[in-house]
Amino acid sequence: MDSPSDRFHQQPSQMCPFELYHSLPDSNPSSHRFSPGSLSSHPLFSPLMHPNSASQRWGSFRQRQGLFPGLLVDDDIREEDVFGKREFATPSSQRCHGEQRGQSSAPDSGEWGQDFARVKRPRMDSAARSEEETGREGKRGRKSRASVRMGERKGEKPGNRRESREGRKRQRQELKLQLEETKGKLLELQRKVWRVYGGQADDEKGGDEEQENGAINLDEVAEMFSDSDDPLISSGFSPPRCSSKKNNETNGNGNAEIFPETSVDLDLELNGDQVWLGCSLVRGEWESAEGGQKFAQALKQELANVVAQVIDRVVRLYAETDASTVTSATVSQETSMALDLNSDRRARPHAVEQVEALPLVTKSPQDKRAPIAQSVLLPHANPSLPPLSQPPLPALLPPRSKDHFLPSYPPDNPVPLPLLHYTMQNLFARSLSSLPLHKDCLSESFMDFRSHNSAFPPLPLLGQLEPSPSDRAREGGMRGGGAGGGDGGDAALYLAAGSSQEGLSPCHLKKAKLMFFYARYPSSSTLKTYFPDVKFNRCVTSQLIKWFSNFREFFYIQMERFARQAAREGPTSARDRSLRLGRDTELYRILNMHYNKSNDYQVPERFVEISEIALREFFSAIQSGRDTDPCWKKAIYKIICKLDSPVPDSFRLPGCPTDTYRMG
DNA sequence: GACCCCCCTG
DNA sequence: CAGGGGGGTC
């Protein structure tokens, strides 16, 4: 990527970062990539980006045609309305005018308006006298509005004057509409010229494959304008190659009667052979092999450069994560990081802990602390996303070993990367609107989030695609963090964690529920271990314990219910079926729904086994009539209590865990 | 007395 | 899911 465009790299300050998104939303994306400031210095592009001469031409044309007579009256008060309020500025001051021009919906409307204003100014001067008269008249009218009404009553005849005023009013309205329309078309012309020029550069280089890919030819542009029903544009704004012919045709189609001077005017222009449509563009400058071609190539390369930069960032991100992977677990983790929408929520105070957690996460199966179910981090869907219809991007996801996944692992869980944008927007939108979040969490996450984007448009996607080095370092020791929860409170997963908060958030509730898959009877110390982002006090501890008590209650109620249902089953075969807790059973579905509502976490097999044990215990007690004893459940509780598994280390980190898979 | 669990209730 | 009561354990 060496090209004249390197100067853009070397002089980033000249780039207006927000310019990319400051252009018209529907404009050619490639044209976004250039800042007007960088381009304005070029003899070719400057007139295109600041096509004052176009509007001058238009203005003078209009003047000659005697069009828009009402504009004379209206210029001084309506100009800003049409083009947006904008101070007149020198071109150099427009280099990074994105922030200054908030009110202007179209990026270049200001320039166009400005140029238009310049054109109109002389006319305004010339019309000043009549304007003054009109103003005086208006003042009179304003002053004597009551008297006019009186006069009406008195039998004066203001009818002609009123009619003319109303006529002018209508004219103004029409003119405003026309101006708006024309403005849009001018902008479109600008974009088309861009594309045309790019296509021409390709032609000159002999490659016309890109011509098919969207670069339109000049005839298209001409057609666009000749098809236009705007007499101004159809008669005055055609590119040179075809303007003569097309406009003659156009004029012959009827516009000639309306604008008899059009063809003459154009002929004059074109015969001059120096000026292109009054754009102050000397033909030689862009049609000569040296100037035009070079510049065209520079433009093209610049386009390619900027596009490639963006693509590079994305690819690099994934290349890095991919290259650093050794084991499947690491792959998973790294990819989780790449997909981790939650990275920002992790507070720096946790960095040490997170770094320490890495070896635990990637430890070998022999080091498993949990003999029953060992969880390792996996790339995981962001549970806050609505159901995705799109398939995942396979290239962006690590290969999955079937051995490492349970059959019911949702195949379409991973988040396609482009959706991160939406996700983050959703998260922040939701988090800002509805969550009882700790202020610190919110602000910290938000600040981190914004800090990513200092050089980019304030779009979450770019910030997420290009985490700062510190962010990457922070993520280095983290598990993948797309937290879970399809319900409304899940946004807290991203914002609640990362700093200690006194209260428990929906995130914590979800985490607690997932923890229940491993520990039905967690001690308070265990809870403190696995909720590091919670400031524990008596109340919080009690609440957490109460949560688990409620979880147990629900669990046992379901067990008893299904055990009794199985006890009612007559045949042994049906009973055995009822006492099995496959992942396709109703009981499993209910449990999963309760503890893993968004179904974004793989229910540990051990939990299924324990549930089945509990179910059979209940069934056995019911069958044997022990349920008549008021304390008959206690024995079962005791059994289940002993079956707690170690909670995966991923739960030690703030926020919600993602997913697990069992080793072997 | 503190803590925890279960149960009931809303 | 939370509040509250009753009971057990330390």
Image: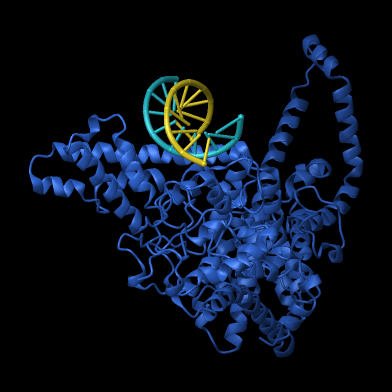
Chain colours: A blue, B cyan, C yellow
> Is residue A597 shown to the viewer in this render?
no
> Is residue A519 shown to the viewer in this render?
yes
Task: Quadrant for the C terminus of chain A, please.
Answer: bottom left
Tell me: A80 left or right of A573: right
Image point 45% across, 50% down: which residue? A514
- Front residue of this view, candidates A277 and A249: A277
- Front residue of this view, candidates A38 and A427: A427
- Front residue of this view, candidates A124 and A342: A342
Residue A604, position as x, y percentages in the image: 37, 57
Task: Quadrant for the N terminus of chain A, please.
Answer: bottom right
Tell me: A75 left or right of A261: right
Which image quadrant for residue A635? top left
Image point 88% across, 40% down: which residue? A130
Residue A213, position as x, y percentages in the image: 50, 75
- Front residue of this view, candidates A593 and A623: A623
Tell me: A574 left or right of A586: left
Looking at this view, name the residue that lies furthest to the top.
A154
Residue A463, position as x, y percentages in the image: 64, 63
Residue A607, position as x, y percentages in the image: 35, 53
Tag count in the figure?
Answer: 0
Q: Is residue A519 above or below residue A376?
A: above
